[in-house]
Structures are given as C-alpha cells and as structure tokens.
Amino acid sequence: MAKSLRSKWKRKMRAEKRKKNAPKELARLKHALGMNAKEEGIMTDIQEIATVVPADKLKKETQVEMTEDGEKMDLDSKRNKKTMLNEHGQYPAWMSQRQAKKIKGQRKAKKGGSGKKKKGIA
C-alpha cells in the first residue's frame, strides 16, 4: 500500500536520520554496556566466562539433536487431516469459527444428515 509520494519521502528522510544518528546511538549503546576505554578489562573477563556463538551454528546443533533422538515434534500428529479435529473434537486455535462451521457442514452433508434446516417455505 504505502506507495504515495508522501510516504516515499518520509521513508527517505527516516533513512537519512538513521544514518545521521547511528554514530551517536552506537556510542550511547557502548556506554550503556560499559564498554568505555577504562572498562575494557571487564569485557575481557566476561569473554573468558561466556563464549559467543553465531545463531546459525546454534540452529544446526538443535536440528541435529532432534534428528538424533529419532522423535519428531507431535504438535498436530493426533489431528485428523480431513476434519481438522484433534482427539478431543476441537478445531485448531488458528481456525476461525466460520471455517470450522463450513467444515462441519461439509462433514454432515457427506454423512447423509441434512444438517441445519433452512428457514422459509418448504
């Protein structure tokens, strides 16, 4: 949606403002974290205690752990694919009431029941 000239101009100006404020923001962040020249020794102590690991490496390790166990996550494994009902007869949380009603109507129509009777002259 946001394709008007005004929104393009505002986006451009926000980007310029980010460029202008980036050095100040970085200095403020370093100060908040205590990374001043005086406190460099503290950071080296912290590095000895904690190790920094990239996120992609962590993701790979977690995937390996899951496959080593041989178990996969059973989020919706007990859910019927056609009716979308779980073992307790509940629809998934993300499904809207309208969708649930539609699936229920289709299921009853296949079963042979007329479902809900329509109002009006017969």
Image (cartoon, rainbow, N blue to C red):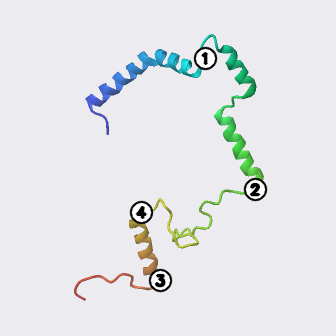
Q: Position of residue 30 (x, y in %)?
A: 56, 18
Tell me if residue 15 comes above or below residue 118 in the rendering.
Answer: above
Q: Residue at x 35, y 23 (%)?
A: 12
Between 51 and 116, the residue placed more toward the observer is: 51
Q: Whole-percent x and y of residue 61?
A: 72, 41
Could you tell me the amino acid type at mark 2?
Gly
Residue 72 is left or right of residue 36, and the answer is right
Look at mark 1 in the image and give the residue it sits on: 35
CA separation in Å, label 2 and label 3:
39 Å
Q: Amino acid at mark 3?
A: Lys
Residue count near mark 4 (Cα–Cα under 10 Å), binned few <14, some 14–19, many ≥20: few
Quick one: label 2 or label 3, which is nearer the N terminus? 2
Whole-number angstrom distance, CA of label 1 to CA of label 2: 45 Å
- Looking at the image, tell me whether mark 4 or mark 1 is earlier in sequence order: 1
Q: Residue farthest to the top?
A: 37
Query: Residue 70's mark?
Result: 2
Q: CA distance from mark 1 to mark 3?
A: 70 Å
Residue flagged by tag 1: what amino acid is it?
Met
Which is nearer the N-term, disc 4 or disc 3?
4
User: Which residue lies under the disc numbered 4?
Assistant: 96
Type of residue at label 4? Ser
Q: Which residue corresponds to mark 3?
A: 111
| Residue drawn at point x = 53 percent, y = 70 percent | 85
Can you tell which of label 4 and label 3 is closer to the viewer?
4
In screen coordinates, is 43 left or right of 89?
Answer: right
